[in-house]
Amino acid sequence: METEVKEKIVSIEKPHLEAPADWQPVIMGILCNWCSYAGSDLTGTSRLQYPPNIRIIRVPCSSRVDPWFIIKSLQASADGVLISGCHPGDCHYISGNYYARRRFLVTKKLLNFVGFHENRVQFSWVSAAEGPKFAKVVSKVTEDIKKLGPLHLYKKENI
Amino acid sequence: MARVGVFVCFCGANIADFVDVPAVVEEAKKIKEVKYAIDYKYMCSDPGQGMIRDAIVAHRLTSIVVAACSPRMHEKTFRKALSDAGMNPYLLEVANIREHSSWVHQKDKKAATEKSSDLIRMAVAKSIANEQLHEISVPVTKRALVIGGGIAGIQAALDIADARIPVVLVEKSPSIGGKMAQLDETFPTLDCSQCILTPKMVDVASHPYIELLPYSEVLELDGYVGNYKVKIKRKASYVNFDTCTGCGACWQKCPVKVPNEFNMGIDKRKAIYSPFPQAVPNKPVIDAEHCTMLLKGKCGICAKVCEKGSIDYAMQDEIIEREIGAVVVATGYDLWDPKPYEEYGVGRYKDIITSLEFERMVSASGPTGGVPLRPSDGKIPKSVVFIKCVGSRDEAKGIEYCSKICCMYTAKHAILLHHKVHDSHAYIFYMDIRAAGKGYEEFVKRAQVETGATYLRGRVSKIYQKGEKLMVRGEDAQIGQVVEVEADLVVLATAVYPYKDNPELARLLGISYDKYGFLSEAHPKLRPVETAKAGIFLAGCTQAPKDIPETVAQASATAAKVCGLFSGDTILKDPMISKVNTDYCSGCQNCVTVCPYQAIVTEEIPLGHGSKEIRTVAKINEGVCQGCGSCVAICRSMAIDLAGFTDMQIINEIVSI
Ligand SMILES: Cc1cc2nc3c(=O)[nH]c(=O)nc-3n(C[C@H](O)[C@H](O)[C@H](O)COP(=O)(O)OP(=O)(O)OC[C@H]3O[C@@H](n4cnc5c(N)ncnc54)[C@H](O)[C@@H]3O)c2cc1C
Ligand code: SF4
Ligand code: SF4
Ligand code: FES
C-alpha cells in the first residue's frame, strides 16, 4: 500500500520521459569549509577519480545551508544536490551540523511530499581526512541521480 | 556595471595536462561581465601576481576570479595581490579547478574542461555580489586567566607573568602543585619532584604579576577573545589568609580526623588542614563537610588556639569578577577508578593499591616514611607485582587509548622499590613497553638491569588470596604459558582519566571535549594548544595524557600564544561575520537560540522613525561571531546575512550554471 502511494507521488519526476543518450546530470555539491571541502581537496591531492558531474559550492558550515539553496538548485539546473559537513561532534562551530541535520531532514520530507525522489537530495558526513570517502559519496550520488533521470519539469528554459 | 577579471592558472602541468586551459579562457570571455581573461603558467608566482595587479589598474576591474588550486591553498596570497593593487582583498573569488577538476578527472579532458568553465562561471557570478570588507579590530584586555595550578598551570602562569602580563591563577584545591607535588622522584632522571617543583610554586606566590586564587572555581565566562569577563567563586576557607602565619597550631589541636586525599587516604588529616608541608599558599582551610563547629556548632578549638585570631567561622563564599583577554585551561587529570576489574578483586583485597598510592608510600615525606607497606598488616612487601594498562587499551573496560606515562613510571617504581627494599623483587605484567622520548628507552633498560625485575608480557586474568599472599595469574605470552606469581603487594597502573567536572567546565567555557572528557584542541597537528574558541588554550593532561616534560612544553606554548595575542592593543578579526538588517527583523530570536557562541543579543529600537514605542531586534556581537552562518539559515525574515557568504552570492553561484 505504502509503496503504491509513494510511487504516485514520485510521478512528478515524469520517469516515462526518456533521457537523451548523451545526457549527463548536474549535481550541486554544497560543502562546509572545514571538513568536507577540505576532504574534497584531499581527494584531489590523492588523485582519486570520480564522475565529473558535481559542481562544488563552499560554505563556512553545513549550518549555513538554507533549504532555499537546495530548492533553487533543483529549480535552476541541478538534477541532484549533495550537502556535506563534518561528522557529528566535529563541527568547527561546535554544533552547526546538528542544526543542519535537522533542517535537512525536514527539507527532505517536504521535497518528498511534493514528489521528488528521496535520492535527489543527499546528505553526508565527510571529514577532512576522508578523501576516499568523498570520491565514493560523489560516485554513489551521481549513479543514483543517473538512475532517476533528468528533472525535465525544471529544465532551465522552462522557468 | 561589474568588470570581472579572470586569471586561469596552468599550475605547471597539474592543470594544463588535464584541462584545455586556453579553451577555458575563451569560454570565460563569453561571460557578459568578464572584461579581461588570461592564463599563465603559475598564477601564484611573482610574475603571475604582477599580472593580476597590472590588470586591475589597466582594465578598471571590480572583482577578480583566479582559477587555480584550492582557495584553502592560496586565497590569502591572491587577496594580498589585490590589496597591493589598491583593491579590497575580499573582492577575490577562487575557482578550484585543480583539486576539484584537473586532479580528479584525469581520464576525461573534455569533461574536466567543461567543469572548469562551470566552476569559473560560478565564481564570476559570486564575485559580482562580493562586497568590500574590512578586518574588524577589537581591543584586548591584557590579562590572562589560568585554570588549574598543576605543573601545567604553574608553568603557563610564570611564563606569561614573566612577560609582564598580569595573570589570574585559579586552583580548586587549597594548594597549587597538582599531581606532581605527590610524586617522589621523576623519570627519566630520577630527580626529586618536590625539589624541582616547590621553587616554582614559591615563584608563583611571590610573583608581582600573578594573582593566585586557591580554593576557587570558575563559574562563568562571558565575552570573546581579548574581552572576556570571568566570574570566580572563592570558596570560604574560614581562615583569614591576611593574618594567618601558617604556624599550624590549629591543625595540631583539631580533634576531627579525615582520610588524607593528598596521601591517597593512607593516613589522616584534620578538618582544618593544609594539604602538605610545602603547600602554596601555606595557609590552612577548614573542610566544611567535616568540621563539627560548622556542622553542629560544637568545638571551636582552632579559634581558641589561633594566636592571630585568624579563624572566622562566619566566612562566606566570595564571588570575584575579572576582565581578561585570554584563558589557559590546565585542569590536569584524575586516575581512572579500577572498579570494573572484578577479577582482580579490586576493593576486596587490601593489598592491591594504585600507582599513586605506591608513589606516596615511597616518597620520603609520605605517610609511611618512604617505605612501601602492605595496607593489610603493615609489613614490608618483598614480592611486588606491577600491572600495567589497567583500564588503558582495554576496550572491554571502556578506554581505548594508551595513558602514555605508565610504562615509564612503572619502570621508575621498580627502581624505587629496589632502592627502598633491597631484598625485594618486582614482577611487571605488561602489554608493550612504550618508551619513546629522550633518555626513556635507556631508563627502562636501566630499571631492568639494575633491579633484575621480571617483565612478563601478557594480561593478568585473575588475582586471588592464598594465606597472606595474593596469587596473580596471568599469561606469559613469550613462552605461551599461564604463570602464577606470589605477591605481597599488587600495584595497578590505572589509566590517566580527565576529572569528572571537565565536561561541565568545557561547557561553561564554550569549548569542546571528547567522549572521555579530555578537552579538544583545534587541530591535532597544527593547532595542538588552541581550542576552536579564539583566545582559549589548553595545557597539560586536561587535553590528553602526557608526562611532565611534555606538559611543560605545552604550557610554555600556550604562554607564547597568549603573549602573541597580547602583542598589540587590538586584534584583527576576519570580517566574514553576520549582520542583522533591523528593518526586516521580527524579533523572534530564533537566531539567538542557534548561535553556538552566544554572539547574538537583543536590542530595543524605536518602532518607527521618531516613534516612542519600541520593538526588540537581534544584534550581533562582532567580536564574538565566528561566521558559521547558522543564524542566517534559521532566520525566517531573511534579516541576517553573512558577509562573504551572503544569500545573494550563493544564489548567484547556483543559478549561474
Ligand atoms: C603514579 C604516577 C607517577 C608519575 N611519575 C611521573 C614521572 O616520574 N615523570 C613525569 O614526567 N611524569 C610523571 N607522572 C605524570 C605527571 O603527574 C603529569 O604529567 C603532570 O602532573 C601533569 O600536570 P598537569 O598540570 O597537566 O595536571 P595536574 O598535576 O593534575 O594538575 C591539575 C591541577 O588543576 C586543578 N584543577 C582541576 N580541575 C580544576 C578546576 N575545574 N578548576 C580549578 N582547578 C582545577 C587540580 O586541582 C590540579 O591542581 C606520573 C603520574 C602518575 C599517576
Ligand atoms: S532570527 Fe531573524 S527575525 Fe528572528 S530575531 Fe534573529 S534576525 Fe531577527
Ligand atoms: S554567524 Fe554563527 S557565530 Fe555568527 S552570530 Fe550567526 S550563528 Fe552566531
Ligand atoms: S564546520 Fe563542517 S559542518 Fe560545521
Image: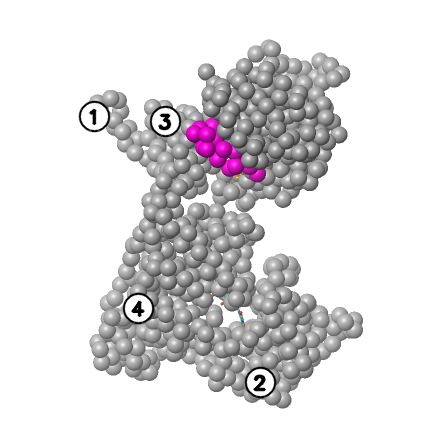
User: What is the CA distance from the residue labelled 2 to the residue labelled 3?
Assistant: 74 Å
Badge 2 and badge 3 in a common chain:
yes
Which residue, given by chain and number where applicable, does mark 4 sit on?
B237
Badge 1 and badge 4 in a common chain:
yes
Q: Amino acid at mark 2?
A: His
| Coordinates of residue B388 in the picture (x, y in percent) | 63, 70
Residues drawn in magenta = B73-91
Q: Amino acid at mark 4?
A: Ser
Q: Earlier in the sequence, mark 1 or mark 4?
A: 4
Q: Chain of mark 1?
A: B
The reply to whether dot 1 and dot 4 touch (C-beta < 8 Å) is no
**Is B350 left, or right, of B460 in this rendering?**
left
Q: Earlier in the sequence, mark 2 or mark 3?
A: 2
Q: Earlier in the sequence, mark 3 or mark 4?
A: 4
Which residue, given by chain and number where applicable, does mark 2 sit on?
B419
Q: Secondary structure at mark 1?
A: loop
User: What is the CA distance from the residue labelled 4 to the residue labelled 2?
Assistant: 40 Å
Q: Amino acid at mark 3?
A: Asn
Q: Earlier in the sequence, mark 1 or mark 2?
A: 2
